[in-house]
DNA sequence: ATGGTAGCTTTGCTA
């Protein structure tokens, strides 16, 4: 089985590229982030036409996560227990955002996660990000059993190691590399979820900003991950980051991350 | 000089 995760930065703008990727790469299950649409706006038909079922949660023009699968989608869950809420405006009650959806696809409990960005070190959004990650760690730790097949995939908005950004000096006063964020990521790993892609893709990035010619200059970041439970990690036979999908007109700013699993 | 690009419910917010 082939499992992938991709922040597509608007599924409506990118639907042709996403379906072409699925067919070209023979991906069975794809976790999508930043669909940027409501459920009623999601382009179901192009996916169904090539044999994929869709589970999506989108509340407005921000965030939005989906799973598309050609090996079944069962037990869909929107959000996880304890997931924090957020309000972008004062005076508006905090509410859960569309940042997590889980489903069992071909026997793998797959999660499509879009971790809050954090914005700036001084921004309340960073505290929200850290709370969100801690709640995810707590929930995900509770899912683990000896034979649980769980994949926590998505855009984590964290570069766990210095080599996961092109120049640490640029990030001296930025989010994504701060010790609390890295500790929050490490806590999920320590709970039992392994980054199964890094060993197959040393030195590679998954994201390049649209501005400043970051992609042609090879100035990227590794912020998209597939973290797998022990029983699932044992099935991994390969992984890759599809840089091709970052090229050309109409590309997302993220590349797909692909994991190969034995039957 | 807080720049650049992209997407959305676009003249502002998010990333």
Image: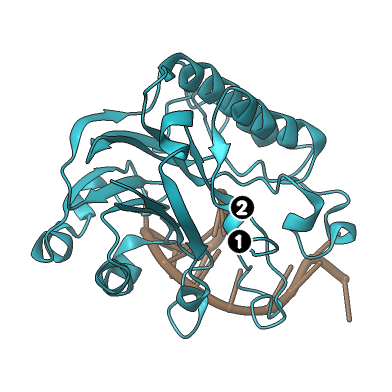
Q: Residue at x 65, y 65 (%)?
A: A204
Looking at the picture, tell me which residue is in the foreground, A141 or A98. A141
Q: Position of residue A97 (x, y in %)?
A: 42, 34
Residue A62 percent across, percent down from the top left: 43, 49
Q: Which residue is mark 1?
A: A201
Q: Vertical placement of A239 versus A124: above or below?
A: below
The residue at which mark 2 appears reads as A198
Q: Colour of chain A?
A: cyan
Assign a secondary structure to mark 1: loop
Q: Above or below — where is A255 with respect to A149?
A: below
Query: Quick one: SS at disc 2?
Result: helix
Residue A198 as seen in the image, left or right of residue A40: right
Q: Is residue A128 visible?
A: no
The x and y percentages for residue A156 are 57, 44
Q: What whole-number distance in Å separates the C-alpha atoms at marks 1 and 2? A: 5 Å
Crowdedness of circle 1 by 10 Å Cα count: few (<14), some, many (20+)? some
Using a 10 Å C-alpha cutoff, classify the residue at mark 2 as few (fewer than 14 neighbours), some (14 to 19) or many (20 or more): some
Left or right: where A237 falls relative to A41: right
Q: How many marks?
A: 2
Look at the image and give the colour of chain B.
Answer: brown
Residue at 53% from the left image edge and 16% from the top image edge: A138
The structure's colour scheme is by chain
Answer yes or no: do the residues labelled 1 and 2 have beta carbons within 8 Å? yes
Subunit bearing disc 1: A
């Amino acid at each position: 089985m082939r499992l992938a995760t991709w922040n597509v930065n608007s599924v409506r703008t990118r639907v042709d590229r996403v379906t072409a990727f699925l067919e070209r790469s023979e991906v069975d299950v794809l976790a999508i982030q930043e669909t940027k649409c409501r459920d009623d706006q999601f382009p179901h038909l192009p996916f169904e036409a090539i044999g994929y079922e869709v589970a999506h949660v989108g509340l407005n023009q921000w965030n939005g996560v989906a799973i598309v699968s050609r090996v079944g989608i069962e037990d869909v869950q929107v959000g996880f227990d304890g997931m924090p809420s957020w309000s972008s405006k004062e005076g508006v009650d905090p509410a859960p955002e569309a940042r997590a959806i889980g489903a069992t696809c071909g026997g793998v409990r797959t999660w499509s996660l879009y971790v809050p960005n954090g914005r700036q070190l001084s921004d309340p959004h960073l505290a929200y990000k850290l709370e969100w990650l801690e709640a995810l760690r707590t929930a995900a730790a509770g899912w683990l059993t000896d034979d649980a097949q769980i994949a926590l995939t998505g855009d984590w908005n964290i570069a766990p190691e210095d080599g996961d950004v092109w120049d640490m000096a640029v990030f001296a006063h930025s989010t994504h590399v701060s010790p609390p964020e890295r500790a929050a990521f490490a806590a999920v790993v320590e709970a039992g979820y392994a980054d199964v892609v890094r060993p197959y893709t040393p030195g590679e990035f998954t994201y390049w900003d649209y501005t400043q010619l970051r992609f042609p200059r090879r100035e990227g970041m590794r912020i998209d991950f597939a973290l797998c439970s022990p029983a699932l990690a044992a099935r991994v036979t390969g992984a890759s980051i599809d840089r091709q999908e970052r090229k050309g007109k109409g590309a997302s700013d993220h590349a797909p991350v692909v994991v190969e699993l034995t039957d």
